Amino acid sequence: MELIQQGDSAAFDELYQRYSQRLLYYFYRMFGGDVEKAQDFLHDLFLKIIEKPGQFIAKHRFTSWIFTVAHNMCKNEYRRLDVRKNSEDKLDATASKFDYEYTRVEKNIDQKIFENHLLKELTKLNPDYQTTFLLRFQENLTIKEISDIMECSEGTVKSRLFHTTRKLMNRLKEFNPSRVEA
Amino acid sequence: MKNVYKNQIVKCDTVEDLLIKQSIEILSADENSLLENHLKTCVHCQEYQNQLVSIQSSMTIDQKSQLKPDPAIHQLLKQRMNAFKPIKHRTVDSPWQRFRNILEYRIPVYQGLIGLACSILIFVAINYFSLSNHQQTRSSEYSINMADTTFYQINVINNLQIIEQQKIGRNVKEDSLLTRFIVSSM
């Protein structure tokens, strides 16, 4: 990050390679599978890094910092728009697309349908709960790191994870691919 | 569904909660052994565990996925990065260091020096020639003798005759006044 502050483009490339895919997935899942919006947010986030590199405080871990920024961007977007309403419609469209693309391989269909429903259910949750869940199971961050990002206690993070997992488990009982395979 | 463990009746709900808890934090030794023993016999909880694993594994990023960052974004950001190169902090150097810094840019300094020398030469040359011309004119003014004066007067009179012929005034009175003025001014 210091190198980026000095205008080192190679350092920026390295940072982009490391985080772009992860952040794209994060935005993609936060916005209910909207790829274009995820790409736009990815662009905006890296633009912030270029234009205001001084905002990063060296004592923080970079991963925590970048996901804090990403989470704040999502929260702002959620405030601005009624994302959930739109994302449900988008998910229906993508589900049918996936059905068409993967008709040949049944296993993949089940998996994809399951993933789409999971995404759909995830989008219905509170953004703070979504982010907590994604940071834990997508990014494999520790409870401590998540609590730093979300600016809440470790107990709150655990509680959020517990309730989110339970809700998802209840709502996705019918779409369990492992049960279909068995 | 119920299961007996260490003289305790363990409900499947409790095990489900433990399974979720296990995915979040480390369980105690008692909780772990309870889970293991229950899962050995309960098919329902085994299914529940499988579903939990499949939900959590669905969240991991598939490297073979088609969802990739748009390469155009990277290009745009690189362009932006080049445009936003920060200005280096200026430090106050010692005079010797400043001189050495100037020497590092040799070609512009030499060009500047040559330009300065040329401009000085041109300035000196212009001043020298203009001064000599001025002196010449002054000396010539003082060396006019009487013969020259009469020569000039004759010339003026000749010119006046021409002017008179062409009738530069609107009438005779004006013409004569003009003639008088010219002659008196000489």
Image (spheres, coloured by chain):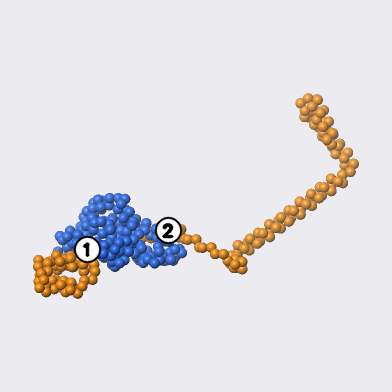
Chain colours: A blue, B orange
CA neighbours of label 1 inside 10 A, class few (<14), some (14 to 19), many (20+): some
Residue at 32 percent across and 64 percent down: it is: A148
How dense is the environment of label 2, judged by Cα within 10 Å: few (below 14), some, or many (20 and up)? some
Name the residue beneath numbered marker 1. Answer: A162
Tag 2, which secondary structure?
helix
* Kind of residue sitting beneath label 2: Glu
Q: Which mark is residue A17?
A: none
Q: Position of residue A13 (x, y in %)?
A: 40, 64
Return the residue at label 2: A51
Helix, strand or loop at disc 1? helix
- In this rendered view, identify the residue nearer to me: A9 or A64: A64
Does A87 appear above or below A111? above
| Side of A177 relative to B147 (left or right) | left
Horizontal and vertical percent for residue B23?
Answer: 22, 68
**Residue at image point 29% right, 63% down:** A153
**Considering only vertical position in the picture, is B133 above or below A172?**
above
Quadrant location of residue A104? Answer: bottom left
User: Is residue A34 toward the left or the right of residue B125 in the image?
Assistant: left
The residue marked by circle 1 belongs to what chain? A
Placement of the C terminus of chain A among the 4 image quadrants: bottom left
* Residue A126 seen from this side: yes
